[in-house]
Image: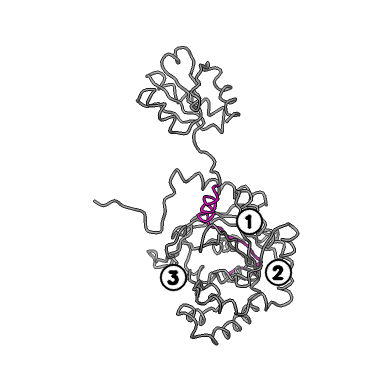
Amino acid sequence: MSRTQAVRGMKDILPAQAQRWHQVEDTARQVFSGYGYQEIRTPIVEHTDLFLRSIGEATDIVEKEMYTFADRKGRSLTLRPEATASCVRAAVEHNLTASGQGLRIWYSGPMFRYEKMQKERYRQFYQLGAEIYAFEDPTADAEIILMTARLWQQLGLGNLELHINSLGTREEQATYRQLLRDYFESHYDTLDEDSQRRLKTNPLRILDSKNPQLQSLINAAPAPVDHLQAESSQHFDAVQENLVSCGLEFSINRRLVRGLDYYTRTVFEWVSKDLGAQSAVCGGGRYDQLFSEVGGAQTAAIGFSAGIERIIAVMDAQDIEVPSSAPHIFLAAVGVAPISAAHSIAETLRNRLAKLRLQVDAGPGSFKAKLKRADRSGAKFALIIGEDELNKQQVQIKDLSTSDQRSIALDDLNEHIENLLLEI
């Protein structure tokens, strides 16, 4: 019988890798909390209509990549391809912005897109992100961007570049879209088949094309930032001024449009030279129309999402150290009475020392075999308990790096281990 394997595009996160994930998730939680954001958890499955209305029917995500199915009552459901639409749906459904005080939320979890397989790009992938609702002021745009910069700093990431742009309001986008359509129609025969199709649905998507033969044509196209009205232009200027005042470097990428139709005004991306062609680590922007497009009241909103796999790939490329998850102490017990007492001794230590990582080996086997397992565990110290030690109400403590070993009374063990932890 053939072995069952993971679905193509879905990846197991194995115990040896999980500590890196904890490092990213725990750091993000601390950073978001430090800015006053609260966690939200939304369902993985949503009504398909939510994404049709929010992401845009002419996007690659909706046209090609969504995992959509009918439930037993014939309702069309979709595994979420991104989280912002779900967060806005939850805010509308539960009236989370009713107080008028605004809302700051963050999230983390799996998303699903049937994408072409590429390095560090999976069909089940993980994102973390944050959103600010009911703040129109450009300081909210700056806060979101500054918070991402803080996250990279706390993770120790370097060599990331911030790109920003402005797409203007929906009305400005409509005017710009016609200019863009006129431009590309004058070069219709030069466009590839995919861009010719996008020209009819949403010409902004052509700016996302990775076809190298189209880049000179795209670079010469009208840019959205050049067609902003006064209010949008002032908003974008204020965002830049806030970033400059906080010492954050950036460049204006006039072709940056992002891959989702709900964006208005500010958009941004962080890119890494360590990821090759798939360089985007994080992206986001303002989406002031999204609340009304999913049935709520008009509400200002801005947010970002970052791929956890992408972040980890950059951390690995930059050799950022992974915090150890190895046990501090490996308790090796041999003999009927010591084996019986081993977990009781271990629980007493854990009760006293909440951060202690202690692994117990109270199964069959010799001290020689168990000390080999202690070495393989990565523990710094081994506690050795045999019949002689238990009769004397003692344990042996062995430094596994130096092989130094000494006896400690059980009554003194808590205090001794506490002092050892200060040295680790």
Amino acid type for the residue under numbered disc 1: Thr
Residue 284 x/y as whole percent: 60, 63
Residue 249, position in %: x, y?
69, 60
Residue 87, how many percent across, how many down? 57, 60
Please, which residue is most extreme toward the left here?
1
Q: Residue under label 2, please give it.
A: 236
Any magenta on residue 304? Answer: yes
Rendered location of residue 306, percent (x, y): 56, 58
Image quadrant in which you'd find residue 180? bottom right
CA gap, disc 1 and disc 2: 18 Å
Q: Which mark is residue 64?
A: 3
Instruction: Give 295 or 126, whichever is nearer the viewer.
Output: 126
Left or right: where does residue 191 sit relative to residue 161? left
Q: Is residue 171 left or right of residue 399?
A: right
Q: Residues within 10 Å of mark 3 (few under 14, many from 20)?
A: few
Q: Is residue 32 visible?
A: no
> Dot 3: what SS?
helix
Q: Which of the labelled discs sits on residue 148, or is there none? A: 1
- Which residue is at 61% across, 83% downward? 179
Most foreground residue, 417 or 249: 249
Mark 1 vs mark 3: which is more N-terminal?
3
Question: What's under tag 3, amino acid-wise?
Answer: Lys
**Disc 2 residue type?**
Phe
Q: Residue at x 64, y 50 (%)?
A: 153
Q: Residue at x 66, y 58 (%)?
A: 103
- Label 1 crowd bin: few (<14), some (14–19), many (20+), radius 10 Å: many
- Viewer-side residue, 207 vs 176: 207
Q: Nearer the viewer, mark 1 or mark 3?
A: 1
Question: In the drawing, what numbered circle is on residue 205?
Answer: none
